[in-house]
Amino acid sequence: MSGLLPGDPAATIGGEATPRALCVLAPNPSPMTLDGTNTWLLSEPGSELAVVVDPGPLDEGHLRRVVDAAESRGKRIALTLLTHGHHDHAEGAARFAELTGTEVRALDPDRRLGTEGLHGGQVLDIGGLELRVLATPGHTSDSLTFHLPADGAIVTGDTVLGRGTTMVAHPDGRLGDYLDSLRRLHTMAAEHGVRTVLPGHGPVLADALGAVDYYLAHRATRLAQVETAVEAGCRTAAEVVARVYADVDRTLWPAAELSVQAQLSYLEDHGLI
Ligand SMILES: [Zn+2]
């Protein structure tokens, strides 16, 4: 949702991203989903087990390609995880669980299949692959990020995208939570030497700290623009969008309006408007 590009727009999407992460791109491109949803297949080299993050939309061909990608590498999918409950990430989860016989774990109990939950602070071991779960609310209240320490990588869902910036899905998503999540991601990435972002949409990013800094700066710029728009007399979120997001493709304006509502609510909560 920005004309600025932190990623390399020429980067290819799909395929091996790190020694432990393979991207299978779903065929659901749109202005909101960029090239489509990135379904991540993660596995420890030499292990027979794999974990899938975000099966993606309910598209039988895509779900079967994910299974084939695992099987052709001699792997069995042992677990399915969700970064959050939006349809482009989670709609195919139930069918994927049926195809693979796996449980689906997510922060939101309504998105789970099976008995086990998922929450920040958990450390998962899938056939020797260590995944640390971080709560990163803001895009949605149920957004999680998965840290793959062995590859110095984070699987970010829609919290950090490979191109442009993401939306804060008001009222479930909250800007204050989102800024806190970005700051915690920054600290964590600096402390643990995280370099690679494996995003929910768009190309892999090689500079995690730079991407998070860019997002923080972008949010600060937008917030100042929204504050100025209100001071200039904009009364509704739609009026603010028309003024502040004039540079953005109009197909994204409905999403921008949710982000503006999140920003207006943040400014009100902080007594700034
Ligand atoms: Zn989303």
Image (tube, helix red, strand yellow):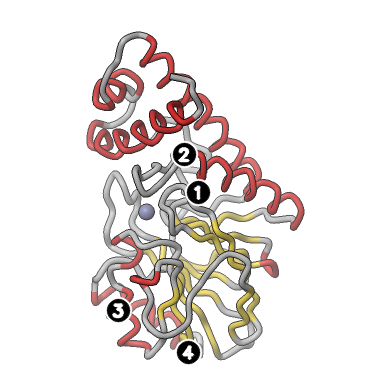
First-in-chain label (4 vs 2) = 4
Q: Secondary structure at mark 4?
A: strand
Q: Which residue is mark 1?
A: 160
Q: Secondary structure at mark 1?
A: loop
Q: Which residue is mark 4?
A: 76
Disc 2 residue type?
Leu
Relative height, residue 67 to residue 189 (above, below): below
Q: Secondary structure at mark 3?
A: helix
First-in-chain label (2 vs 1) = 1
| Marks 3/2: CA–CA distance | 30 Å
Q: Which residue is mark 3?
A: 94
Disc 1 residue type?
Val
First-in-chain label (1 vs 4) = 4
First-in-chain label (4 vs 3) = 4
The image quadrant of residue 111 is bottom left
Disc 4 residue type?
Arg
Is 206 situated left or right of 169 in this image? Answer: right
Q: How many marks?
A: 4
| Marks 2/1: CA–CA distance | 14 Å
First-in-chain label (3 vs 1) = 3
Q: Nearer the viewer, mark 4 or mark 2?
A: 2
Residue at (58% x, 64% y) in the render: 120
Disc 3 residue type?
Ala
Residue at (46% x, 70% y) in the render: 53
Q: Which residue is mark 2?
A: 175
Residue 18, x across and y down, in percent: 60, 66
Q: Nearer the viewer, mark 3 or mark 1?
A: 3
Residue at (32% x, 34% y) in the render: 256
